[in-house]
Image (cartoon, rainbow, N blue to C red):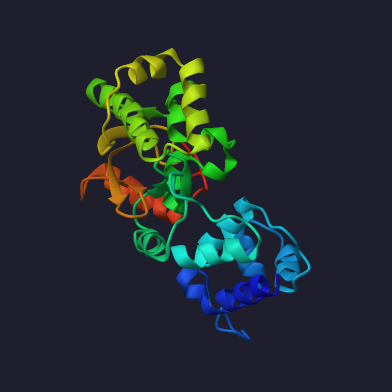
Amino acid sequence: MDEFAGVLRAWRERVSPAEVGLPAGPGRRTAGLRREELAALAGISVDYIVRLEQGRARNPSPQLLRALAVALRLTDQERDHLYRVAGAAPPVAGVVPRHIGPGVQRIVDRLSDVPLAVFSAAHDILLWNPLWAAVNGDPSALSVPDRNLVWRYFTSGHEGTDFDEQHEEEFASDLAADLRAAVGRYPHDDELGRLVARLRSVSPEFERRWSEARVAEHRASRKTVTRTAVGPITVDCDVLSTPGADLRIVVYTAAPGSQDAEKLALLGVTGLQALAPAVG
């Protein structure tokens, strides 16, 4: 674990606060991240970071390693090295990629003025910006199954979001077809296989669409998000693919100068804080 501790410290110290959207602040003894900052980004305790860097923590889980790799903005090669020196097997070919590399992370950082989220090929949400949470609700408050878009759509519906008839039909059909395409690309991903099996057993609507054997990629839709702090917002939803990483970057936009664009801009200021109701 000495190599693990060494690379963890080195990679933490090379990431500047500005890269992860944190203020540098006065009195910093290092140009990189503090332990408490890395802990917050990875969703673990500061004490655990200390024990990892001192070689006192053993056998970190793959989920923890994945979180550290994203927080530290590691390349695929660096991520694999982190797994190996931690005594874990790196993600293998034939399994849905879930690593967010530095390039995709920078796209998320730069497009802070639009709602944006990153999904895996299985439609698990992996990363989102504050404006996405302000429009759709905070994904961190969802259960793990509900963080999968296909599962949530076919088992819980789309309460809080309205489609016109054409876009709703296209959206549902594309989700099932896109998931089938992922099964073809990642035949050894047990988690993906279990997701499809559960969907087919609990959702007749998904089973009907799955039986059509359509293969396609979900690209775009138009929807109205009704439950925001500023009222309903109609947005165009575009899906951008990342070759190599096989991630989906989902972006919401509204026509410039429209009321919907003004509402998005207002949400960018208010964030997750609900607006006070008008008086009189």
Residue 108 lies, with reference to residue 159, above or below; the image says below
Q: Position of residue 82 (x, y in %)?
A: 58, 65
Return the residue nearer the eye: 34 or 258. 34
Residue 107 lies, with reference to residue 219, above or below; the image says below
Please identify the quarter of the rendering in which residue 135 is found. Answer: top left
Q: Position of residue 205 (x, y in %)?
A: 39, 15
Is residue 74 left or right of 85 when viewed as pictured?
Answer: left
Q: Quadrant of the N terminus?
A: bottom right
Residue in the image at 48% along x and 22% along y: 199
Return the residue nearer the eye: 155 or 182. 182
Is residue 62 left or right of 151 when viewed as pictured?
Answer: right
Residue in the image at 60% along x and 74% along y: 7
Q: Position of residue 124 (x, y in %)?
A: 47, 41
Q: Is residue 273 visible?
A: yes
Residue 191 lies, with reference to residue 98, above or below; the image says above
Residue in the image at 55% along x and 33% along y: 145
Q: Position of residue 189 (x, y in %)?
A: 48, 39
Q: Is residue 278 visible?
A: no
